[in-house]
Image (spheres, rainbow, N blue to C red):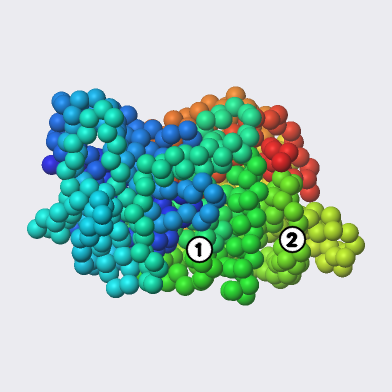
Amino acid sequence: MTKSPLIEDHALLGNSRSTALVDRSGTITWLCLPEPDSPAVFARLLGTDDHGFWRLAPADIAHATLTRRTYQGGSPVLDQDWETPSGVVRVTDFMPVPIDGAVPGAQVVRIVTGLRGRVRMRSRFRAAFGYGLTTPLLRFLRQGAAHRTVFAHRTDELWLDGPGHSLDDRHTAYADVTVQPGDQIAFTITWRAGAEPEPVVPDGLAMVTDTLGGWSVWTSRCTYPGPYREAVLSSAAVLKSLTHAPTGGIVAAPTTSLPEELGGERNWDYRAAWPRDSAMTVAALLRSGSHRAEARAWRNWLLRSIELSGDVRAIYRLGGGTDLTERVLSHLPGFAGFLPVRVGNGAADQLQLDVYGHIAEAFLVAEDAGLEPDPNADALLVALAGEVIRLWRQPDEGIWEVRGPQRHFVHSKVMAWVFLDRAITLLARRGSSHEHVLARMRKARAEIHDDVCTNGYDPQRNTFTQSYGGEDLDAALLVIPLVGFLPADDKRVIGTVEAVQRELSTVDGLVQRYPTHAARDANVDGLEGHEGSFLLCSFWLVRALHALGRTAEARRLFGRLLKLRNDLGLLAEEYDPTHQRQRGNFPQALSHIGVIDAAADLARTAAPHLPGQRGVGHRTLTSA
């Protein structure tokens, strides 16, 4: 009987060009090339070997044990040590980073190193283009001493370099090599598209040196000095891996359709750039260190994307496009057999008012961290101010992208207030040139605040509610003190935090986003069934408790959350406390943002804040 795969069994490879997942059997189960939102060439994660994979492990895998896997030096360069009856061997997996800071190539390198005895290793490689739909044409080349296998589909090619491979009757390439101490053998795949020149034979051993050097330079800028430094740096490396150097965009996660509920319908594609999630990523990176380059690249990406689309969209493709038509890939059986498998995302056309607040917040955090002002960004803030003033009274789908009816979500209104508050701060720094706009913005900011406090608050229960006129709670309400909408010692804030703990907590203090029920029409999101505890919300609870002065309780919860990470420090979107398993797309930017932001808050003393002041979660920790 085959053991069901676990989401947390995977490791992440990334180089700010694309990403890959490797499981504990030494198999790359997921790889999209040349970009993270391209169709997968290895899709075993959501299917079978027939849908594409690359396994590099001891040939006698039945008698081999994976004794250790770890990342080198805070980078996503993965070491996996195997012990066999005949010896010990290490496989090092990574996606190359050029030492000169150039845009990374779409490549994966795997290096086998003999450590003790003699170990026979086997590479088994099956490329399947278009999410496993298409078997490519193969040709075998010999160029000097180099053995090259080319997998081709139309104008796209995947070049496999290393020991010569043969082809079995299942259209899988394979090669066996034997290593002993001192031996190092590199395998490399390189993407070639269209009329690009034929890739040169790569030097995988030199590439690992350059890659470790590049990551060493980057991690040296992670200057976060507080407690939980290991967790912060690990999460920062995940976020950096999800950035996209060619465009400046940032993906929310490198995967699609990893289930939030086993057997449920909550399987979504997160291989796209949400302005909200990417803005939060930029802000978290800046709180972890001097990462202005990523902030500048993202700001330029956002300006280009909005110019292309003509307005702010909920989701963009990495290239700035807006075609995210959602469809089901019926040929894939799904992760562990759980359907559906989706590509694209139907939430792209939704109205999500909170996006505006996250954009302005990221602009302010970046400028406070030393990023130079940009007149184009200022012009965008002025234009978006008009949109927010026009739209804030409308219902929307909100941060959780509900697929039920639009509502007047309290969190959306609060984040509209955040947009105006942060934009006012930024534009006021530019002198009197924007005074005519600032007067309108200040008036609207006060109106939103009064409206939320009047219509979004239930005085009988002493709590804010998910939406106007509703009774349900929402964990997103925990941000009210974190963004400075109300001070943490306000009785309404205290009541809301306690209500979320009481009504939305599951096991060990973990938090659900909102109540869910079995019936579709009973759920605010318009979906059937339930989901796991949402990890970002649980980190918000850590921060809210700390802001209320309940720091010991906050630290205990934070410690429990850190223990949910896998052995490499990675987190999915959700956690299933019943089965004690990670759920949802993996690794998830929002969860790692939560790690950094909660650690940053716990590193300083909580203090209450007055309306109009920036909250405890919105100060940069660096002076860079």
Amino acid identity at mark 2: Asp
Q: Which quadrant of the figure has residue 274?
A: bottom right
- Whether residue 376 sits left or right of residue 181 in the image: it is right
- Whether residue 287 sits left or right of residue 85 in the image: it is right
Q: Which quadrant of the figure has residue 130?
A: bottom left
Amino acid identity at mark 1: Leu
* Residues packed near mark 1 inside 10 Å, few (<14), some (14 to 19) or many (20 plus): many
Q: Mark 2 or mark 1: which comes first in sequence? A: 1
Residue 364 against residue 382 in the figure, above or below: above
Asked whether residue 100 appears in the rendered view, the answer is: yes
Taking depth in this image into account, of 276 and 451 the one nearest to the observer is 276
Query: CA separation, marks 2 and 1?
Result: 22 Å
**Residue 444 x, y percent position in the rendering:** 78, 62
In the rendered image, the quadrant that contains the N terminus is top left
Q: Secondary structure at mark 2?
A: loop
Residue drawn at x 37%, y 47% as measured from the top left: 203
In the rendered image, the quadrant that contains the C terminus is top right
Outermost left residue: 169
**Residue 407 x, y percent position in the rendering:** 57, 63
Q: Which quadrant of the figure has residue 545?
A: top right
Q: Which residue is mark 1?
A: 318
Q: Secondary structure at mark 1?
A: loop
Taking depth in this image into account, of 74 and 516 the one nearest to the observer is 74
Taking depth in this image into account, of 100 and 64 the one nearest to the observer is 100
Q: Which residue is mark 2?
A: 374
**Residue 496 x, y percent position in the rendering:** 62, 42
Outermost front residue: 144
**Residue 283 x, y percent position in the rendering:** 63, 47
Residue drawn at x 44%, y 65% as measured from the top left: 345
Residue drawn at x 50%, y 39% as measured from the top left: 213
Residue drawn at x 60%, y 63% as measured from the top left: 301
